Image (cartoon, rainbow, N blue to C red):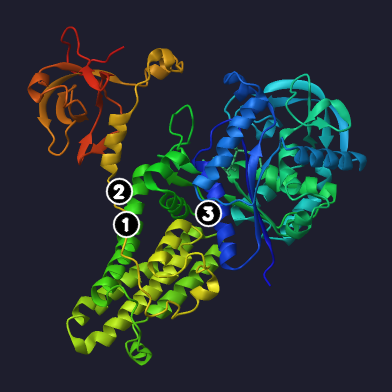
């Protein structure tokens, strides 16, 4: 009997909408939980939202809402997003839940009574962004390493948790349990931090400064520091201390977090647990960060990737697949929509999708859609190794998943898919179909391919659950039966000969990225100024946009694109620009005009043409009016 599993994600701050990073961690947890299904392992999967603290108060204020109204709104964005991404969490915890608050109070009281919490005056450098004090050595050139801002000196009396008391215990525990924090680089990071004396943790905030938090059970004038409150979600959600879920799952707890919150999870949390007399979690699994187009994802840069938007364009399974395939768990990865499209077209549309439709089409063409019967002796004689390859793929997939090497699990699976594609080429069923004498061989080949696809359908289940079911339906299997069970994936001859298969389908249509980009440009809404929330920028920020006068030298229609014109403009250098103004301007009208161009816009390929810049135009009810200059100037003259 396999042990149960308890898997958790961080509980996300509700100061901003969910983005790619939140989606990644939660998808990974879902993949692990579905992999547990494959092993018939009982798994409890927790996610939720972190709703107290200064960050939330400030975000609510910006929106002219009370903290309570605000947390309701954002928390439900997270809660409602997960089913959209096929994430099936067992529980969604909120730190404003009464049951959670009660546990925080109980644990605080317990630790206070044991003497591990004391009251003291403290003067230190406080970063409001991080909501914590910083020791001098932790600052980078005197600034917060995360926010780049100078911390403020704050002097106040507060409650402290005796974290230092548990430093040696923690070092010993990590050394005795080398897999406690993994991958190893993060374990080493924590150990190296623990080489310096550990300071005690300030766990309170005076209500004069912050009211939005859990009141300390032993002092009405203070609220609990948000991390002390948040970390306890992992036990409060299970009904600590007496709940049946707590007793069953806590001994098997595995947390998943990114490297940004290694310290609270690798240091604060185990020491809090130790002091409260709760056994430590089993593993802390730490992953890296998704950067976007080689830079940090940030609201101010405007490159935040919205998971729902990606799902709506590319589909849930495809989006999940890309995230799992393209990040090595533990390392940083770069997200770009273009790279994603490339991956989806190659791996999903070409390799898997084409194979699937080809095989199903052959069942229909050669066997009227009925799964052929196989002459086993002949099959052995023809030994082309597909069965062996399939079982190898299953075992490689399994060991990679166990090691959190999700990308390797996908690589193993795609190696098998590529072997199946080769198997089709080598056995050439269309040749076998030509003669009666090779009919039995044709039956064996097609049956083997169907079995191979069945195994693929089971192995993709954790990452692409809908496609898994869809494939099974088309293989004549009942998707409600757990055809993803590893036991079944280690068996052959599972599909019953004689089964009538439904007509073929396209699992993944090819994506035309240029078309998506064009549609985006064409459909970008123009909001009336009075309704638009204007984001103020500084002059310095404005000057980052390099506007130049440019003379149109050539203009031509792009075949197949009704709205586009290809322009050649002189702006000190000759540039090609694709502009969506073909409905409102003829090429002849444009030549000779002096227009305004955004010169430092990242080039994009539109309809196969590299467009380096953008012509400014006003758009009203879909009609464009381009910006021209009143007097002619030297091409390339900057606009200020
Ligand atoms: N509320 C705390 C966690 C408390 S857990 C007891 C918090 N919240 S957060 O909203 O900032 O979420 C941080 C987590 O979101 C990261 O640890 C990671 O799981 C995920 N990610 C946020 N940005 C990310 C990337 N750019 N890339 C990958 N994951 C990232 O910290």
Which quadrant does the C terminus fall into?
top left
The tally of labels here is 3
Residue 195 in view in this figure: no
Q: Position of residue 199 (x, y in %)?
A: 78, 38
Q: Earlier in the sequence, mark 1 or mark 2?
A: 1
Helix, strand or loop at label 3? It is: loop
Query: Mark 2 = which residue?
Result: 511
* Mark 1 closeness class: few <14, some 14–19, many ≥20 residues within 10 Å: many
Residue at image position (76%, 41%) is 100
User: Can you tell me which quadrant of the image ligand 1 is in?
Assistant: top right
- Separation (CA) of disc 1 from disc 2: 8 Å
Residue 21 vertical position relative to residue 172 in the rendered view, above or below: above
Quadrant that contains the N terminus: bottom right
Given residues 99 and 272, the one toward you in this image is 99
Q: Residue furthest left?
A: 588
Between residue 502 and residue 100, name the one nearer to us: 502
Q: Earlier in the sequence, mark 1 or mark 3?
A: 3
State the SS at label 2.
loop
| Residue occupied by mark 3 | 329
**Residue at left offset 44%, top offset 29%:** 302
Q: Residues within 10 Å of mark 3 (few under 14, many from 20)?
A: many
Asked whether the beta carbons under mark 1 and mark 2 sit within 8 Å of each other, the answer is yes
Callout 1: SS: helix
Q: Is residue 73 above or below residue 30?
A: above
Q: Which mark is residue 349?
A: 1
Name, please, the residue furthest toward the top. 631
Q: Which is more N-terminal, label 3 or label 2?
A: 3
């Amino acid at each position: 009997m396999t042990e149960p599993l308890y898997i958790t994600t961080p509980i996300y701050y509700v100061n901003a909408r969910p983005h790619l990073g939140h989606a990644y961690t939660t998808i990974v947890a879902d993949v692990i939980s579905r992999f547990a299904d494959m092993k018939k392992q009982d798994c409890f999967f927790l996610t939720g939202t972190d709703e107290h603290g200064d960050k939330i108060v400030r975000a609510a204020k910006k929106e002219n809402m009370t903290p309570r109204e605000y947390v309701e709104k954002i928390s439900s964005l997270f809660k409602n997003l997960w089913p959209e991404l096929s994430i099936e969490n067992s529980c969604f915890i909120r730190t404003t839940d009464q049951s959670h608050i009660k546990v925080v109070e109980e644990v605080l009281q317990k630790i206070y009574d044991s003497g591990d919490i004391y009251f003291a005056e403290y003067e230190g450098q406080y970063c409001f962004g991080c909501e914590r004090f910083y020791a001098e050595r932790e600052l980078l050139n005197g600034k917060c390493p995360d926010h780049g801002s100078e911390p403020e000196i704050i002097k106040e009396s507060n409650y402290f948790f005796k974290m230092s008391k548990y430093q040696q215990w923690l070092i010993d525990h990590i050394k005795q349990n080398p897999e406690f924090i993994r991958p190893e680089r993060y374990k080493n990071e924590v150990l190296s931090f623990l080489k310096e004396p550990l300071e005690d943790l300030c766990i309170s905030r005076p209500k004069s400064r912050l009211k939005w938090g859990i009141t300390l059970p032993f002092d009405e004038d203070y609220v609990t520091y948000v991390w002390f409150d948040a970390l306890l979600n992992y036990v409060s959600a299970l009904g600590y201390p007496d709940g049946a879920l707590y007793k069953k799952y806590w001994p098997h707890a595995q947390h998943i977090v990114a490297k940004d919150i290694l310290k609270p999870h690798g240091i604060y949390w185990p020491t809090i647990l130790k002091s409260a007399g709760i056994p430590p979690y089993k593993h802390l699994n730490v992953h890296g960060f998704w950067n976007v187009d080689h830079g940090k994802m940030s609201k101010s840069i405007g490159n935040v990737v919205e998971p729902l938007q990606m799902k709506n364009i590319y589909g849930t399974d495809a989006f999940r697949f890309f995230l799992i395939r393209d990040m090595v768990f533990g390392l940083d990865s770069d997200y770009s929509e273009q790279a994603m499209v490339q991956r989806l077209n190659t791996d999903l549309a070409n390799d898997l999708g084409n194979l699937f439709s080809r095989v199903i089409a052959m069942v229909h063409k050669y066997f009227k859609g009925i799964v052929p019967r196989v002459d086993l002796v002949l099959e052995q004689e023809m030994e082309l190794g597909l069965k062996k390859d399939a079982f190898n793929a299953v075992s490689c997939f399994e060991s990679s998943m166990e090691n959190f090497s999700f990308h390797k699990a996908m690589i193993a699976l795609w190696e098998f898919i590529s072997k199946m594609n080769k198997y089709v080429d080598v056995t050439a069923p269309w040749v076998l179909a030509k003669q009666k004498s090779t009919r039995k061989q044709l039956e064996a080949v097609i049956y083997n391919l169907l079995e191979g696809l069945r195994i693929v359908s089971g192995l993709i289940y954790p990452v692409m659950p809908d496609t898994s079911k869809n494939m099974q339906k088309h293989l004549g299997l009942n998707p409600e039966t757990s055809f993803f069970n590893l036991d079944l994936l280690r068996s052959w001859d599972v599909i019953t000969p004689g089964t009538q298969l439904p007509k073929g389908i396209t699992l993944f249509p090819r994506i035309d990225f240029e078309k998506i980009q064009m549609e985006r440009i064409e459909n970008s809404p123009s909001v009336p100024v009075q309704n638009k929330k204007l984001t103020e920028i500084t002059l310095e920020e404005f000057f980052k946009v390099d506007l130049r006068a440019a003379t149109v030298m050539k203009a031509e229609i792009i075949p197949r694109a009704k709205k586009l014109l290809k322009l050649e403009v002189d702006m000190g250098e000759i540039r090609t620009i694709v502009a969506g103004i073909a409905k409102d301007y003829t090429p002849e009208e444009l030549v000779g005009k002096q227009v305004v161009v955004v010169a430092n816009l990242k080039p994009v390929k539109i309809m196969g043409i590299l467009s380096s810049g953008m012509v400014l135009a006003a758009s009203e009810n879909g009609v464009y009016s381009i910006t021209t200059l009143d007097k002619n100037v030297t091409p390339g003259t900057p606009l200020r």
